[in-house]
Amino acid sequence: MSKLEPPRYVKILFDQYSQNGIMALNDLHKFLMEFQGHEQATKDDAHAIFNSLKYLNIFQRKGLHLEAFLRYLMSDLNAALCPSSGVHQDMKAPLAHYFMFTGHNSYLTGNQLSSDSSVEPIINALRNGVRVIELDLWPNSKKDNVEVRHGGTLTSPVELIKCLHAIKDNAFHASEYPVVITFEDHLTPDLQSKVAKMVTKTFGKMLFCPESDQMKEFPSPESLKKRVMISTKPPKEYVETQNSKEKDTRQKSRKSSKKEHWEDEKAASTIEIEIETETDDKDQLVQIEHIPDEEEEIEYRNLIAIHAGKLKGPLENWLSIDSNKVARLSMSEQEVENATRTNGTDIVRFTQRNLLRVYPKGLRLDSSNYNPFVGWTHGSQMVAFNMQGYGKHLWVMHGMFKANGRCGYVKKPDFLLQLDQNNMVFDPSKQLPVKINLKVKVLMGEGWDLDFHRTHFDLYSPPDFFVKLLESQVIKLSGKQE
C-alpha cells in the first residue's frame, strides 16, 4: 500500500495556519480557536497535541509539519465530541432518566460458548467508562464457593471474589459516577449468604444499601458518586413472603373501615415531629440508606438496591406502573423488538420511572451485538452489549458514551421523560418532521486495509470503495444540539 497522502483540502488548510511548512504551538492554538471552534482552547491543549505525536518519527521540535498535522486530525484528540467539555448534563435526576453504559457477560474474553472467564474484560470495560457490569453466579464443583461463568457452556470459570476486587480497584478510574453490578443468580441460600459477606467485606462503605426493601424513586447519579449498587432478583423465599404480605394487606383492607374511628383517635394523640433537611441542591434526591459496618453481616436480600425481574406472563402486567416502588425489568433484544410493535408507548411510560435492561439474544454465540437504537428510542437505560465483540453496533455504543465527558451516563432527551397535555407519552412509531439536515464531507479513510493480506490487492484488482453513513434523528433541545 502506498504512503498515506493528505487530501488537497487538508494541504490548503495546513498552509493557511503554518509558516514555512511548520505549524508552531501558537499556530496550532490559533487553528483550534478559529477553525475548530474551540473558543476555550488554551496553549496547554495545543501542547497536549504536540506531546501525543512525539513518539512518531514525523514529529519535529519546532512544530508540526503536514504529515504530523494529518495524524492529529485523524486521532482521538480531534474527536467529533470535544472531550474538554467534561460532564455538562444535569446529573441530579433519578437514574431512570439516563442511558447507562452497560456490559453483557462482562467476564468473558471472547465468544459465548467456549472462551475463558477472566477479570481482564471487567477491568477493560470499567477503564473504558462502562458503568453496568454483569456477573453470572454459579456454585463451584464442590458446591462450597461461588464462581462466575456462562452456565450451560464450555466457558471456564473465574472466582467471584477476584471479580469483586477487580471492580473495586477499577470502578472509578474513568468516571466517579455509580457502578451497578447485575447478578444473574443461580445460587442456593447458603451461597447467597456467602456472596453477601463477600460483597460487604469487599466494598464496605462504597456499597449503597437502601433502608427500605422497595424504593419509590431511584437516587440520582450525583448523589451516588463513587458508590456501588447491586441489582438482581430477590431470593425466592423473600418474594414468597412479600406476596404473602400483599395478600394479607388486601384482606385487612376489607376490615379497615371498622377501625377508622379508633385510628383517628390514636392519630390525634400522636405528636408528629417533622425534620427538614436543608440543602443547597433543591433537586438533590434524599435517599435514606443503611451504611453497613465492616463487621456487620447483611442478608443477601438487603444488598439489593435495584430489584430485578425477567419477563414472565403477559407483558402488560410487567409494564403496569406502581407508584409505590421502582424496579428493573430485563428483556432480550427479540422480546423488545416484538414488544415495541404492540406496546411501544407502554415501554416509554414504564422507563420514565423504572429501568429496562435489554440483552443480546442467545444465538449471538460469537459475541456480536444488535441495533441499540430500538432500546434507546423507547427509553431503555441499560442496552447491554458484548464489549469484547466487534462491528458497527459496538462502534455506535462507544460513540454514544463519548458524550457527557465520557462519564458513562447520558441524559435522556426530554421527550422520553415528559407527558403531553393529554397525559400521553412520546410514540416512537410516529414519523416526525426533519429538524436538521447534517452534511458530511468524507475526505479520506484509514485502517480498512488491516483486515486484508498485504498481497490481497494489486494493480489489476483495485478495491471498490464506498462510504456508508448511518442516519439517525438529531433532536434540538433548549437551543442546544447534543
Image (cartoon, rainbow, N blue to C red):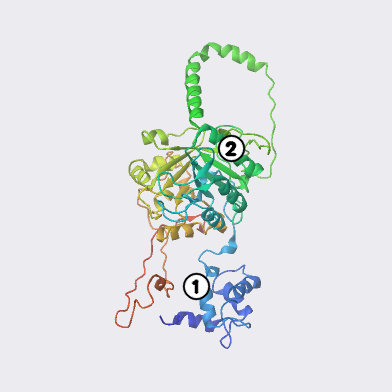
Single out the residue that lies furthest toward the front.
142
Residue at image coords 49%, 82%: 11
- Whether residue 208 is visible here, answered yes or no, is no
Dot 1 or dot 2: first in sequence order is 1
Query: Which of 228 and 159 lies nearest the eye of the viewer?
Result: 159
- Report crowding for label 2: few under 14, some 14 to 19, many 20 or more residues within 10 A (C-alpha): many
Residue 325: x and y in percent read 52, 33
Residue 431: x and y in percent read 35, 52
Amino acid type indicated by mark 2: Ala
Residue 260: x and y in percent read 56, 14
Residue 267 relative to residue 184: left or right = right
Mark 1, secondary structure of its residue: loop
Residue at mark 1: 74
Query: Which of 67 and 263 lies nearest the eye of the viewer?
Result: 67
Q: Is residue 340 above or below residue 210?
A: below
Residue at mark 2: 196
Q: Is residue 46 above or below residue 438?
A: below
Amino acid type indicated by mark 1: Met
> Distance between the Cα atoms at labels 1 and 2?
48 Å
Query: Which of 21 and 117 lies nearest the eye of the viewer?
Result: 117
Query: Which of 205 and 117 lies nearest the eye of the viewer?
Result: 117
Mark 2, secondary structure of its residue: helix
Residue at image coords 35%, 50%: 363
